[in-house]
Image: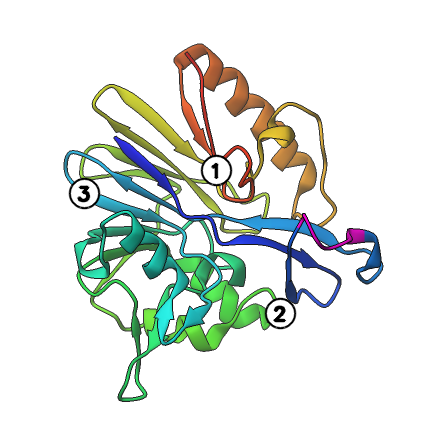
Amino acid sequence: MNIIPLSEGAFTVDKTKAFVPFEPSQDDLQSRSAGSILVEIQPFAIVTSEDILILDTGMGFEAEGTLQIHRNLAAAGIYPEDVTKVLMSHLHKDHTGGISQVDKSGLRRLSFPRASYYIRRKELEYAFEKASSSYITGELAVLKDSRQVVWLDDDAGVVDGYIRYELTGAHCPYHQVFHIVDGGENVFFGGDVAPQLQQMKSRFVAKYDYDGKKCMELRQEWWKQGEEEGWTFLFYHDIKTPVYKFG
């Protein structure tokens, strides 16, 4: 497998849940509003023997009408129509900004025109019921009736024989994770339950998680199993160490 981190940079987030760009070499975290935390954003592309996968879709920033995730993919020689599957851990706005975009005619369309989007149905329903600033429902509405969406309803299952998904909750009620096993390699994407390398090595409990204790316990379990079985971990919120491989 060819794993391609698609870094979109660093941001600070405070209680308003607004993401403000942050340049570590120039900006001072202490000068930001009280309670601000530093968040790094990094979707992934994975080229397998069968597919070109996208794991979560970034912030959705555009320059001259082109999504940042599209620009990052193009730098790797991949174009939107090449992507065959989009795997979504959950639908918080920092993971779904690039899920759709408004075209030249003013219509909002999914940003990978030939891909199947793997979405947990209850997560989308929750996004509209919750009316939380963590979700931007205007960007998600296009999913509801799209023929490109594959709804995931089971607690666990397998896609095309080599992509395993599992409902975890913990970060939010309907969060899910993915194992991709291809060519003898086991790649694990834990979304926001396993967002950074440093969190895997400690008993960190975050107040911003729906169930922080469960997040911590799952990280401990995955880290132990990953070491025993030689997993490759992908970290969405860690641009310093996006990929960590045991073995």
Q: Which quadrant would the C terminus be assigned to in this image? A: top left
Q: Earlier in the sequence, mark 1 or mark 2?
A: 2
Which residue, given by chain and number where applicable, does mark 3 sit on? 51
Q: Mark 3 or mark 2: which is in front?
A: 3
- Mark 1, Cα crowd under 10 Å, few <14 / some 14-19 / many 20+, is many
| 235 or 5: nearer the viewer | 5
Which residue does the image show at 48% across and 56% down from the upper left?
95
Is residue 39 found left or right of 14 in the rendered image? left
Q: Is 25 one of the magenta-colored residues? A: yes
Q: Which mark is residue 133?
A: 2
Q: Mark 1 or mark 3: which is in front?
A: 3
Query: Is residue 73 positioned above or below 14 on the image?
Result: above
- Mark 3, Cα crowd under 10 Å, few <14 / some 14-19 / many 20+, is few
Span colored in magenta: 24-29
Give me the C-alpha separation between circle 3 and circle 2. Answer: 33 Å
What is the secondary structure assignment of the residue under circle 1?
Answer: loop
Q: In the image, residue 127 lies at what x, y percent?
A: 51, 66
Which residue, given by chain and number where applicable, does mark 1 sit on? 190
Q: Earlier in the sequence, mark 1 or mark 3?
A: 3
Give me the C-alpha separation between circle 1 and circle 3. Answer: 20 Å
Which residue does the image show at 60% across and 23% down from the upper left?
220
The residue under label 3 is which amino acid type?
Asp
The residue under label 2 is which amino acid type?
Ser
Total labels: the figure holds: 3
The residue under label 1 is which amino acid type?
Gly
Q: Is 242 one of the magenta-colored residues? A: no
Q: Are marks 1 and 3 in contact (CB under 8 Å)?
A: no
Q: In the image, residue 22 lies at what x, y percent?
A: 65, 57
What is the secondary structure assignment of the residue under circle 2?
Answer: loop
